[in-house]
Image (spheres, rainbow, N blue to C red):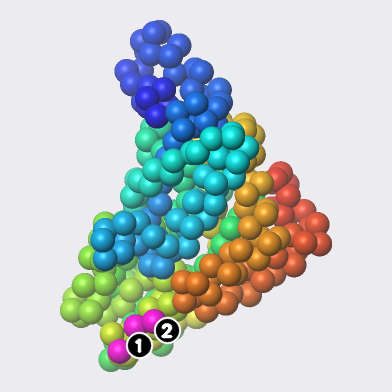
């Protein structure tokens, strides 16, 4: 990890720049040489990424990253340790750019502007839309009814502006999900603007806790999620390894199996991707075409 961290050192010093160059050239080889893959994951997006009773990071995305480390271990002929680094929406791309992590899988929507910052590999691995989970007494029954209402959100989420502020909501943003949950349940805001994928397992797995809340708007802006490496490494071995793993996860049905393991209702997008990948659809290859 030391070599990879050097690229975040003092800009302009020739020595630092020279030392950073080899790390940028082949992060996968650095991972193999050092015996450790460092991955950024969410600690606040159950059940994709969360902390268990002992404080360990667990979840669907963590299981996928464990499999990635296992794949690299098998190819390297040595054990590759998986180091998990907790990230949030507001710092996940920054951590990747700075070399604090090698790979990022953190419930990130694949948006064109984000591809300008980090290397989102092809294909995507999951998908979700945007909705508002609202209290039964909120008076919210569609996007046109949130004007003037206090709506909670997460710092750095693109839809705070596109679907909250643009519809006249008074957005109250927090750094992480636990803070939002507390504010919603304390009724400091009447609704929660977030991914529908986060609401569904809560309603399924904690029905009493969320009995007074329901998805009160149509689900809009369905956007696939992307895993990422540094922008200039998308076609390098580390990017290729991540892309190949995602293709295999779709073909094997592993993601659908993990949905069941973590109590997530089966999603049509995941089933559709498995069918497309098995059929050789271009959406499931390692190259992003202009129309994708």
Secondary structure of the residue carrying numbered label 2:
helix
Kindly identify the residue that appears in the image at 54 percent across and 35 percent down: 78
CA neighbours of label 1 inside 10 A, class few (<14), some (14 to 19), many (20+): few
Depth order, front residue of 5/232:
5
205 in magenta: yes
Query: In the rendering, at what x and y percent does residue 91 appear?
Result: 34, 45
In the rendered image, which residue does mark 1 sit on?
207
In the rendered image, which residue does mark 2 sit on?
204
93 in magenta: no
Which quadrant holds the N terminus?
top left
Query: In the rendering, at what x and y percent does residue 7 appear?
Result: 40, 23
Q: For the magenta stretch, what is the residue range?
A: 204-208
User: In the picture, residue 217 is in which quadrant?
Assistant: bottom left
Depth order, front residue of 90/100:
100
Secondary structure of the residue carrying numbered label 1:
loop
Asked if residue 85 lies left or right of residue 265, the reply is left
Depth order, front residue of 55/165:
55
Task: Report if residue 275 is visible in the image.
Answer: yes
Kindly identify the residue that appears in the image at 81 percent across and 62 percent down: 279
Residue at the farthest right position: 279
CA neighbours of label 2 inside 10 A, class few (<14), some (14 to 19), many (20+): few
Q: Is residue 3 above or below residue 147?
A: above
């Amino acid at each position: 990890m030391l070599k990879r961290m050097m690229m975040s050192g003092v800009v302009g010093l020739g020595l630092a720049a020279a030392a950073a160059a080899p790390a940028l050239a082949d992060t996968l080889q650095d991972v193999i040489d050092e015996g450790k893959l460092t991955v950024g994951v969410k600690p606040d997006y159950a059940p994709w990424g969360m902390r268990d009773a002992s404080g360990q990071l667990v979840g669907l995305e963590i299981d996928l990253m464990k499999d990635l480390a296992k794949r690299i271990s098998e190819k390297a002929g040595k054990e590759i340790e998986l180091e998990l680094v907790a990230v949030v929406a507001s710092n996940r791309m920054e951590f990747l750019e700075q070399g604090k992590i090698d790979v990022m899988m953190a419930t990130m929507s694949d948006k064109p502007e984000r591809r300008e910052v980090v290397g989102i590999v092809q294909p995507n691995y999951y998908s979700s839309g945007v909705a508002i989970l609202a209290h039964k007494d909120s008076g919210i029954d569609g996007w046109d009814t949130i004007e003037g209402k206090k709506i909670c959100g997460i710092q750095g989420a693109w839809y705070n502006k596109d679907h909250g502020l643009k519809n006249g909501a008074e957005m109250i943003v927090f750094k992480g999900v636990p803070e939002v949950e507390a504010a919603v349940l304390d009724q400091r805001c009447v609704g929660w603007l977030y991914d529908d994928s986060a609401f569904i397992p809560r309603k399924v797995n904690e029905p009493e806790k969320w009995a007074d809340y329901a998805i009160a708007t149509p689900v809009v802006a369905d956007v696939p999620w992307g895993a990422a490496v540094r922008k200039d490494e998308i076609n390098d071995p580390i990017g290729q390894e991540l892309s190949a793993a995602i293709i295999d996860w779709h073909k094997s049905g592993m993601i659908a199996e993990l949905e069941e393991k973590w109590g997530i209702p089966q999603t049509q997008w995941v089933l559709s991707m498995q069918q497309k990948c098995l059929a050789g659809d271009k959406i499931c290859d390692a190259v992003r075409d202009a129309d994708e």
